[in-house]
Image: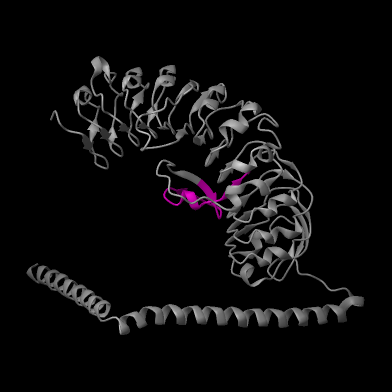
């Protein structure tokens, strides 16, 4: 097959090693063997003798391939896209990658060791394919820190080093350069030394900051309101972002095509100290905030309700004190709340949205001075304030009733609008009406045939 340009055999049950003969498809542009049961090693025959001059994409992810990454891959002068994640690759990543035209490198979930090479991104003639560089090396056993040569990537968009190294080094002088166009930065559980990213780094580059997700192992920086992508997220399509796993609403989820729409700050499982900065409450586009498992103290900011797009808020396992801000009850998008195991005190919140959250007791567990009807510890009213307490409770009940009535009206009006929006279209549009009922009739005929065939088979038995 001398003229074959695309070989697509993914999502099958192909076993055995990758044959050397694949290296001799002189016209091949894309080779996709992902999601199979391939074993053995990657052949070391690529690019030898100027063969395969047109290969741009090599996809071998989600197999059982072992051994090192062959250096002959570096000789593929047109190679742009390499995805070999989720295998059992071992050994070191060769320095030969410094002279390639790669735009997308995904080597995540392997057993690679040694230092991270430069991956210098030589300008490719095929600029219409991608205008950035995307590097996924998470979940390996690399060492030596993040190389300074990454500053040569003026359009680095993804840098994912999470859970891949210990005692990582991130020279602070590189921050304004390599973070300028990032859309995703993953450095969780990399033991970055304190202040290695610079506490005020976002302030220095706020005019061009496009970062949509932050996952750091570092004391958090100030000037959060300058994170432009988090106040006005850029949801433009970017097919090279890849997939990212994030813990949202207490559940680990994988984001692929919806990743550009996710605005998330995850600083959990670190050694963060001090109080939650008020500036963080100005990130109006934030959808998820996770500061759990740290050593944060002080109070929860009173104006945290300014995060009016927040879906998930997790402040558990810290040393926060004081009362729970009433503004949390004004976040009507909230679906997950965890304030457990702090030193909070006072009454729990009773907003309409908060009452829809499941298992109220778990939200406030481990706070010995928090009380409420949904908790084992009930709130008590002092004798000299009993009359005032009853008056306040009566006033609060009236407010809750009014809110409930308003909520019911909104739900009913929404239902009526949606119902008549569909039914009205069918009534007024003859073509839609015919198509709809024809679809129902076809479905009925298909189901009738299936039932009759099944009944006939049963009778023959």
Which image quadrant: the C terminus?
A: bottom left
Residue at the far bottom in the pictured view: 427
Does residue 23 appear left or right of residue 356 in this picture? left
Residue at the far top in the pictured view: 49
Image location (x, y in percent) of residue 241: 44, 42
Check the image and report above or below for 69 versus 360: above
Q: Describe the colour scheme in one phrase.
A: one colour
Determine the image quadrant of residue 375: bottom right
> Any magenta on residue 388?
no
Bounds of the magenta span?
Answer: 246-267
Image location (x, y in percent) of residue 320: 76, 51
Image location (x, y in percent) of residue 323: 78, 60
Q: Residue at point 48% right, 29% down?
A: 140
Determine the image quadrant of residue 422: bottom left
Residue at the far right in the pictured view: 384
Does residue 430 appear left or right of residue 365 in this picture? left
Which image quadrant: the N terminus?
A: top left
Q: Residue at point 44% right, 33% down?
A: 108
Check the image and report above or below for 333 versus 423: above
Residue 284 shows up from this direction: yes
The number of callouts visible is 0
Residue 93 shows up from this direction: no
Q: Closer to the camera, 293 or 61? A: 61
Image location (x, y in percent) of residue 434: 22, 79
> Any magenta on residue 247?
yes
Q: Closer to the camera, 176 or 188? A: 176
Q: Closer to the camera, 147 or 329? A: 147
Determine the image quadrant of residue 431: bottom left
């Amino acid at each position: 097959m001398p003229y074959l340009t695309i070989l697509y055999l993914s999502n099958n049950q192909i076993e055995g090693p990758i044959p050397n003969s694949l290296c001799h498809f002189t016209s091949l542009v894309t080779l996709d063997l992902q999601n199979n049961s391939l074993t053995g090693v990657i052949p070391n025959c690529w690019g030898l003798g100027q063969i395969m001059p047109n290969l741009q994409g090599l996809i071998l992810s989600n197999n059982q391939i072992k051994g090192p990454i062959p250096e002959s891959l570096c000789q593929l002068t047109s190679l742009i896209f390499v995805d070999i994640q989720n295998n059992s690759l071992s050994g070191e990543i060769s320095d030969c990658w410094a002279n390639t035209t790669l735009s997308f490198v995904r080597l995540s979930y392997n057993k690679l060791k040694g230092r991270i090479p430069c991956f210098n991104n030589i300008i490719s003639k095929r600029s219409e394919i991608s205008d950035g560089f995307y590097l996924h090396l998470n979940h390996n056993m690399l060492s030596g820190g993040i190389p300074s040569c990454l500053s040569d990537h003026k359009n680095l968009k993804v840098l994912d080093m999470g859970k891949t190294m210990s005692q990582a080094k991130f020279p602070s002088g590189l921050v304004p350069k390599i973070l300028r166009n990032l859309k995703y930065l993953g450095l969780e559980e990399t033991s970055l030394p304190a202040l290695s990213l610079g506490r005020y780094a976002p302030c220095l580059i706020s005019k061009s900051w496009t970062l949509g997700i932050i996952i750091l192992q570092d004391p958090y920086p100030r000037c959060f309101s300058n994170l432009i992508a988090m106040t006005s997220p850029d949801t433009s399509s970017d097919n090279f972002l890849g997939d990212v796993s994030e813990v949202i609403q207490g559940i680990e989820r994988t984001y692929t095509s919806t990743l550009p729409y996710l605005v998330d700050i995850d600083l959990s499982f670190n050694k963060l100290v001090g109080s939650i900065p008020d500036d963080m409450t100005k990130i109006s586009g934030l959808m998820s905030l996770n500061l759990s498992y740290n050593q944060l103290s002080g109070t929860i900011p009173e104006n945290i309700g300014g995060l009016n797009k927040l879906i998930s808020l997790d402040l558990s396992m810290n040393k926060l004190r004081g009362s729970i801000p009433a503004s949390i009850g004004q976040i009507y998008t909230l679906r997950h709340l965890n304030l457990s195991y702090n030193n909070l005190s006072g009454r729990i919140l009773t907003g309409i949205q908060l009452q829809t959250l499941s298992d109220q007791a778990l939200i406030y567990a481990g706070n010995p001075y928090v009380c409420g009807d949904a908790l084992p510890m009930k709130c008590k009213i002092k004798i000299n304030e009993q009359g005032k307490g009853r008056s306040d409770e009566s006033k609060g009940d009236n407010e809750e009733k009014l809110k409930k009535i308003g909520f019911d009206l909104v739900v009913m009006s929404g239902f009526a609008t949606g119902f008549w929006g569909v039914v009205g279209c069918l009534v007024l549009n003859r073509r839609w009406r015919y198509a709809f009922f024809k679809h129902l009739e076809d479905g009925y005929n298909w189901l009738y045939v299936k039932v009759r065939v099944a009944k006939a088979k049963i009778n023959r038995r």
